[in-house]
Image (cartoon, rainbow, N blue to C red):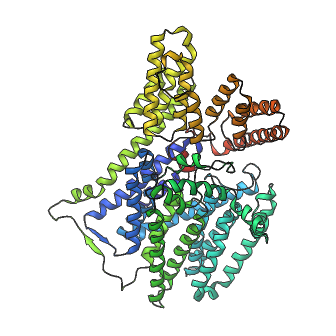
Amino acid sequence: MPALWLCGFICALYFNNEWQMTLFILAIVLGFIWAMGGLWAQAKNGFDIPRSYTVLFIALFWGLVGLSILWSEIPYVSLMGFCFFSVLPLTFLTLVLRRDVTAMTWMSYGLAGIMVLLSLWAMVQFFVLNDLFEGRAHHPLADPNALGALFNLALFPAMGWMLGTENKRHGQIALGLSALLIGGLICTGSRGAFLSCLLTLVVFLWLNRPVLRAHKKCLLLLGVIGIGFFALSATGDRPHENMIQRVGETLTTSVPAMMADVSSNRLDIWAGAVNLLKDHLWTGTGFATFYLYYPEYRLPQDEVGATMAHADPLQYWIELGVLGPVLFYAVLIAVFCRFRRFLKHKTPSDSTPSIVAVSSFCALMAVIAHTHISFNLYNLGLLYGVGFMLAVWFLATALPRDSAPRHFNFPPSLSASVRGALTVLPLAMILYVFTAYTISESLVNKARDQIFAGDLFNFGETLNVAHKIGFHGNYRAYLLAANVPMGILQGSAKELDTAKQKELYTQALSFLNRAKAMNPRSASATYYLGRVQQLVPPEIIPTGTASPTSYFEAALRLDPLHLGARGALAQIYQTQGDKKQLYDVLKAGLPYQYRDPKAMGFYAQVMMACLEAGDQACRAETVARMSEFKARAEKSARRQKWEGASPVIGAEGALADTINR
């Protein structure tokens, strides 16, 4: 069983972009199956449920995430998000209820081996492929901060192992592992992870002070190695991205400069997120839907186009309502109180459990401190790791004086198989629905590849299967289906009579209205509702239908980065000869950072509008944007040779491109 969980953790690292959706599905399916297997085995003897506020608040928070599906405007996305998040509480609760120390030990060894490989690969990215990875190691994760947090989660247990073992060989292995993890952390260039590590290190050393003297040589050597890696970070090809430079800028004496540097666009993201929060203060938008709402509230200064709030408590509030941060901090307070009680009442002979408790607590502390300026708890690999570390900490902080657990068992008349089945049935049902939806997503991606290749026959077959498997609830399937009648109207409108055009228009409208009903936040569905009107004669369009201009403007409100809507709106103004409106709508899209290949065409349009308006500053900015986009695209193409081909999921794909990897 430990191997199954470890396989799930490996899949959660998304080590190959081309398999991203497959790995996402496997990571969650394996996590659920592992938990169901453990709970099935435990059900025959019943469950000893700890009388603990930590367990209670974690269960309540998990329940709130599940309940948010009921009020979510896009329930299937929130359901997928619920399954995504469930990896953490399932890992924690399964390990706590089973208390299988042997299995947890093997899981620890497996995680240590994986972290060794990740650390070495991070160093290769920094010291060998520095420019290719833009000065900061991040692969297999998409974000260097998430990788830094993962190293922090392993670093403190590794140092605890070094301090707690009586085996000299094990101590040397732990020292080596700690050194590699420090090196990997520094190679990520993540200031948030690094500074949270330093802050937590002070707590770690203070709480372990009784055993420090016996290991002072190892600690001094580890300190020298850490300083060495920190100094070597200056050898990167991109000076601004090395850890020395980034930390130095952070600690500048100029407060305004420090705030601007530390924020890295976060202040703008938070300001937009607070605007979103004001409209969903009490109940939230539904779990994992932030990325669908935020574009409408994004400030013009936020050029990057974030899909996360970069502050997990804030995002929990937006998605779960006011109870989200309340329960989140209730968990943290319960953890702190339990840990404080453990330190107060443990016996002097409890040195090993104490080191385990302190190490796991510090690992969690580093990740949680960092998550207030990042999105660690929306990263699948970290959810696995935090769930495991939380279970280790919880079991290590148990005291003889704790209240006896509440025992739950099924009626003795039920067989062991029936007890197991009743225990895992709710999880099995959730997993079934999740698997159906995610397979539907994969098939929609496949269908889109087929339509781009002109394979209309297989496209239709694939899309029909996606509809059925996804319980006809996948809005992207309807969105893609609308491309067929719209494609016929666009390519053969002159050859069709009015009746046929009306039939195709009605069919496209039906698909788009269904997509819009399932996801009111879809800028693409809104854009297509305007675009389809441009493909048919005016007499076919029902009286009272909103104009294409209205739909394109609405699509841009939902997502200012939607180039299709911006280009279509610009075309309308150009046809009308309204040069001012044309210039305004194009220039309004210039500040944003695009990943869509159509951006080069957009920049060409902006260039022409700037020349006609005589705006030389706009022209210069457009040239700079074009150069930056081209360089970024070329860099991305080279990097994909190492990371695997980029997946085709799209801007409105499941969980924002599987929760931003």
Q: Is residue 463 left or right of residue 221?
A: left
Q: Is residue 635 left or right of residue 596?
A: right
Q: Is residue 607 above or below residue 167?
A: above
> In front here: 140 or 339?
339
Q: Quadrant of the N terminus?
A: bottom left
Q: Is residue 620 above or below residue 359?
A: above
Q: Is residue 616 left or right of residue 178?
A: right
Residue 661 visible in the current orientation: no
Which residue appears at 59% of the width and 35% of the height? 553
Residue 226 placement (x, y as % from top left): 72, 71
**In the image as oriented, which residue stretches furthest toward the bottom?**
348
Which residue appears at 16% of the width and 65% of the height? 412
Q: Is residue 341 above or below residue 636?
A: below
Residue 415 visible in the current orientation: yes
Numbered circles on residues, count: 0
Residue 402 placement (x, y as % from top left): 36, 82
**In the image as oriented, which residue stretches furthest toward the left?**
413
Q: Is residue 604 left or right of residue 113?
A: right
Q: Quadrant of residue 646?
A: top right
Residue 403 placement (x, y as % from top left): 32, 81
> In front here: 533 or 127?
533
Which residue appears at 40% of the width and 31% of the height? 465
Residue 25 placement (x, y as % from top left): 46, 46
Q: Quadrant of residue 608?
A: top right
Q: Is residue 454 above or below residue 46?
A: above
